Amino acid sequence: MDIFHEHVVADFVSQAQWNRWLLNQVLGPELVRQVVKVPPPSARSSDRMVWALTQDGSFSVSSAYSLVSQASNYLGYRVRLSVIVVLNRQRRRLITFFTRDLNKAVWSRFEVGLGDWTMVSMLRHMVLRWWLRKGHNVYLKFVYHMLPMLVCWELWKVRNKGIFYGRKVGWTEVADQVFQQLCDLLHCSFPEIACCFVSWDVLHASLVGLKRRVSILPISWSVPRTGFKLNSDGCARGNPSVSGGGGVVRDWEGRFIVGYSCFFGSLTSLHAELKAMLFGVRLCVARGFQELHVESDSFVLVQILQGTHGCPWRLQRVVDELLSVKPHFHEITHCCKEANKSADYLANLGANTEQDGVFDDFRALPVTVRGEITMDRLGFPNFRRKLL
C-alpha cells in the first residue's frame, strides 16, 4: 500500500482500527488479541526490547533454559537431552575433582570438627557442610561461608594450570593461597580485626574465642527542612501475595497533616512500595502541599527514582506515573525502617482490613500510629538491635 492510500484509509477508520489492521498483517488473530489488550507506554518513555521471562527485562541463559525445558517438541527434547549429557559430564568431573589426593589434602587442611570424611562423596556435600555450620559470632559465620568458595576457586585454578600449562602445584601452596585470601577478605569486611594470623589454626581459635557482641543503634525520624514530609511504606505477605500501603504526611514541626492506608490485592513487595508512594504523592498534590520531601525505607525504590538502579520492566508504567509528578517533590531519601514505623503500621492495616482509608483527623488514627507520631515529634528514637 503506498503513502497516498494509507492516508485515505486512515481518514475512514480510527487509529485503533488502523493499528489492529497493521498487526493483522504480521501476527495471527490470537496474538493480535493479546497485543491490543496491552495499554500503550506513556509518552515520556521510549520503547525498549524486553525479555519477559526475567524481572529486569534483560536476557539470561537460565530463563532461556527454563523455557526450553518446558518445550514438548522434538527440538526441545534434543536440547534437553544435550543439556543432561553435559550436566552428567560436569557431575563426573566434579566428583573426580573432589576425590583427587591434592584436593583432599587442601580440604583436610581447613577441617575443624566436621566429622567423618567417609560420609562425603561429592564436592557439593563438602560445601554444604561448611555453609550449614553455625558460628556463634558474625566473624565465624563469614569464614564458614567464604572458605569453601575460596577453596573451590583455587583448586579450579590449579586444575587449569595443569591442563593448559602442564604445571603441577603442591597442596601446601594452594592452602596458603586460600588462607591469605581469607585473611584479606576478613580484614576488609571487619576492619576492627587488626591482628595478623600466622595460620589457619590460630585464626580459627581466635575467632572462636571472640564473644558475641550486641550492637544497639538509636534511629530517629527527622523533620523536613521546609515544607512537608511524606513517609510511605508498602507490604506484601508473599512475593507476590496480599499487599497494602500506607503513609503519613507531617510538616516542618513534626505535626500530623494527613495519613492513609490502602489495599492493593496481590502484588510484589516492591510494587506495593511503589503504589503506596504514588498514592501519597497524588494525595499531597491534590491538597496543594508544596515543597514535598518523600521518604521510604525501600532502598531499591529510592535508587530507581534517583536513576541509579534499573527498574523491573513490569513496574515501568507505575514508575513513569510517579516521575510525572516528581516536580511536586524536591527531595526523595531513604530511611531505616525504625524511622518509618507509623507508615509501616498503616500499610499492614490496609493489607489486613482489605480497605482503603484517609485519616484527616489525628484522633481517627489507630492508637499505635498516634503513639509513634507523638514519639517522633518529641525526638525519641527507636532502637535497632543487631547481634555481632
Image (tube, rainbow, N blue to C red):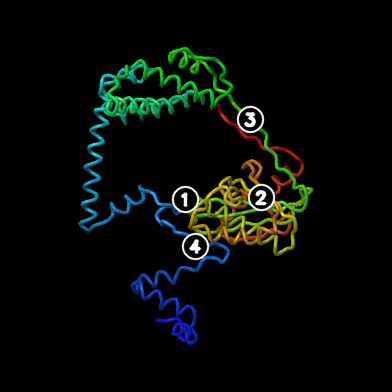
- Label 1 is placed on what type of residue? Asn
Distance in Å between CA atoms under marks 4 and 2: 26 Å
Mark 2 vs mark 3, foreground winner is 2
Q: Is residue 251 left or right of residue 142?
A: right
- Label 3 is placed on what type of residue? Ile
Mark 4 vs mark 2, foreground winner is 4
Distance in Å between CA atoms under marks 1 and 2: 25 Å
As helix, strand or loop, the secondary structure at mark 1 comes to: loop
Residue position for label 2: 332
Q: Is residue 332 left or right of residue 73?
A: right
Residue beneath the point at 53% across and 18% down: 210
Say which label, 4 or 2, has the lower sequence index.
Answer: 4
Quadrant into which the N terminus falls: bottom left
The reply to whether callout 4 and callout 2 are in contact (CB within 8 Å) is no
Residue position for label 3: 216
Say which label, 1 or 2, has the lower sequence index.
Answer: 1
- Label 2 is placed on what type of residue? Ile
As helix, strand or loop, the secondary structure at mark 2 comes to: strand
Say which label, 2 or 3, has the lower sequence index.
Answer: 3
Residue position for label 1: 239
Q: Is residue 187 left or right of residue 219?
A: left
Number of residues whose C-alpha sits closer than 10 Å to that of mark 1, classed few (under 14), some (14–19) or many (20 or more)? some
Q: At which x and y percent is residue 71? A: 27, 56
The reply to whether callout 2 and callout 3 are in contact (CB within 8 Å) is no
Question: What numbered label is drawn on residue 47?
Answer: 4
Mark 1 vs mark 2, foreground winner is 2
Distance in Å between CA atoms under marks 2 and 3: 27 Å
Quarter holding residue 100: top left
In the displayed structure, would residue 29 be above or below residue 132? below
